[in-house]
Amino acid sequence: MAVDVLLGLQWGDEGKGKIVDVLAPQYDLIARFQGGPNAGHTLEFDGKKFVLNTIPSGIFEKHTMNLIGNGVVIDPIILKKEIEKLKEAGHDLLTKKNLMIARKAHLILPTHQLLDASSEKKMGDGKIGSTLKGIGPTYMDKTGRNGLRVGDINLPDFKEKYQKLVEKHLSILSNYGEVDDFSEKEKAFFDALELLKKFPHVDSEHLVAKYLKEGKKVLAEGAQGTMLDIDFGSYPFVTSSNTTTAGACTGLGIAPNKIGEVIGIFKAYCTRVGGGPFPTELDNEIGEELRKIGHEFGATTGRPRRTGWIDLPALKYAIMLNGVTQLVMTKADVLSGFDKIYACTHYKYDGELIDYMPYDICTIQPEPIYEEIDGWKEDLTGIREVSEIPAKLQNYIDYLEKHLEVPVKYLSVGPDRLQTLILN
Ligand code: GDP
Ligand code: IMO
Ligand code: MG
C-alpha cells in the first residue's frame, strides 16, 4: 500500500477541504502534514458549513481516522476552539475517538504570534501579508532547535522549557518596542493543553507505516498551496513549510517510495491572499466579479482574495514539483456566464517568451500572455452527471488537460459535497 497525497497547486484555497471530505470514505486515515491554523479548509454538506484550521477534513466520515502530523504547527487555543465548535455541532471528537495528534508536532506559543505581528509591522509595505497565527516564528524555532513539541507537554519540566522559550521571545520583542500583555493568552494556552492531553499522542511515522502494513488506505492532506512552498514558492511571499509532496514525506514520516497517487487541486481561475507576485491578477471589474461570484474572502482572516485568470506556467511548475497524477478542478461554476475566459500560457520576461516561473518573479513582473477560450453560459451548480457538462466547459477541460498533460479526474461545481463529478 502507498499513501495518496492531496494538495493545492496554486496559492491556497483551491478547495482542498471540500475534496478531502468527498474522498474521505475511500480512506482509513486522513493525515494533515504541514502548516497550521493559517489554513482554513471549508466543508459543506447537509446544509451545514464547517471551517477547519488544524483538524483534518476527514473528521465527518464515520469510519475514517484523522491525524495531525508531525509537520503541523499547533496552536492549542485555536485547536481547542475548533474541537469545542465541532462538539456544539454534534461531533464530539473525544467520544468518537477519531483524532490523533503527533507527538513531534510543534506548538505555537502566544509569543510566537506577537513575534509574527511585530515582524510584519516592521516590514511595512513589503510585508508578507501573514495570517498572523505565529506560523513563521514557530517553524523558525523548530529549525533553530528551540521549539516545544506536543510530546513535551507531559514532561515534568515543561513549564521551565516554556518559560525559557518565552524569555528568548521577549528579548527579541523588546527590540521591536513595547510588548503587548499576553497573560490572558498564556492562561488560555495552558488551559487548552489540558484538552490536548486527552487525545492520543502518536508517532506519525510508525502509525502510518502500521496502516500501510495492514493494507489500509491513507490520504495525506496538504494546506496552503505549491506557490506558497518555502523552497519553491514566490519567496519570500510564502508560508514557512513545504507544501509540496516532499512535505508529506517529512511531515508524516513517509518514505518517498511509499507515495501513491498525487492529487493536485486547482481553481478554474486563480486567487491569492496576502502580498507577493501574482502574474495573472485582474485588478479590475473582472477581478471584482470573480471575487463576488466566487465569494473570494479568506476562510481564516476574512480578507478579500486577489483574483485572476488561470496561470498555466505556474500550474505546470506545481505539477512537476509534486509529481501530480490526477487533477481536480474546482469552482468551474464561478466562470459560468463569462463570454470569454483566458488562460495564461506564457510569460513575457526580459523580452522573451517563457513558460516557467522565473527566479526573480518578485522583482521583475512577468507579463502574462493569454489564449482566449469560449466561455459557457449554463449554470453548473445543479449538474450531477458527466453527460450534463456543457460542451464549452468540456472544451476548457480538454484544453487544460492538453497543456498540463495530467487528467482532470474530478470536477467541482459548487461548495457542497454533492456538487462533485468524477470525470475519468
Ligand atoms: P481550502 O483552503 O483549499 O480548503 O479552500 P477554502 O475552503 O479556503 O476556499 C475554498 C472556498 O470555495 C470555500 O468557501 C469552499 O466552500 C468553496 N468551494 C469549494 N469548491 C467549490 C466549487 O466548486 N464551487 C464554488 N462555488 N465554491 C467552492
Ligand atoms: P489554506 O490551507 C491561502 C498566505 C498568507 C500569506 C502567506 C504567509 O486555507 O489554503 P502565514 O500565515 O503562513 O505566515 O502567511 O501565506 N497563506 C494562505 N493563503 N490559503 C492558506 O491556507 C494560507 N495560509 C497562508 O495569506 O500571504
Ligand atoms: Mg483555505
Image (spheres, rainbow, N blue to C red):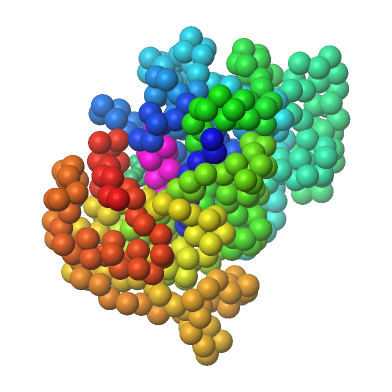
Residue 76 position, x and y percent, is 62, 25
Image-based side of 121 in relation to 351, left or right: right
Q: State the image quarter where residue 252 is shown.
A: top right
Residue sitting nearer the eye, 417 or 116 = 417
Q: State the image quarter where residue 363 is shown.
A: bottom right
The residue at the point 47 percent across, 39 percent down is 40
Asked whether residue 129 appears in the rendered view, the answer is no
Image-based side of 155 in relation to 302, left or right: right
The residue at the point 37 percent across, 50 percent down is 328
Q: Magenta stretch: dominant SS?
A: helix
Q: Residue furthest bottom?
A: 351
The residue at the point 84 percent across, 14 percent down is 156
The residue at the point 36 percent across, 77 percent down is 370
Residue 268 position, x and y percent, is 33, 58
Which region shows up in magenta? 12-21
Residue 59 position, x and y percent, is 45, 25
Asked whether residue 402 appears in the rendered view, the answer is yes
Please tell me whether residue 3 belongs to the stretch shown in magenta.
Answer: no
Residue sitting nearer the eye, 148 or 315 = 315
Q: Residue furthest top?
A: 95
Residue 147 position, x and y percent, is 78, 35
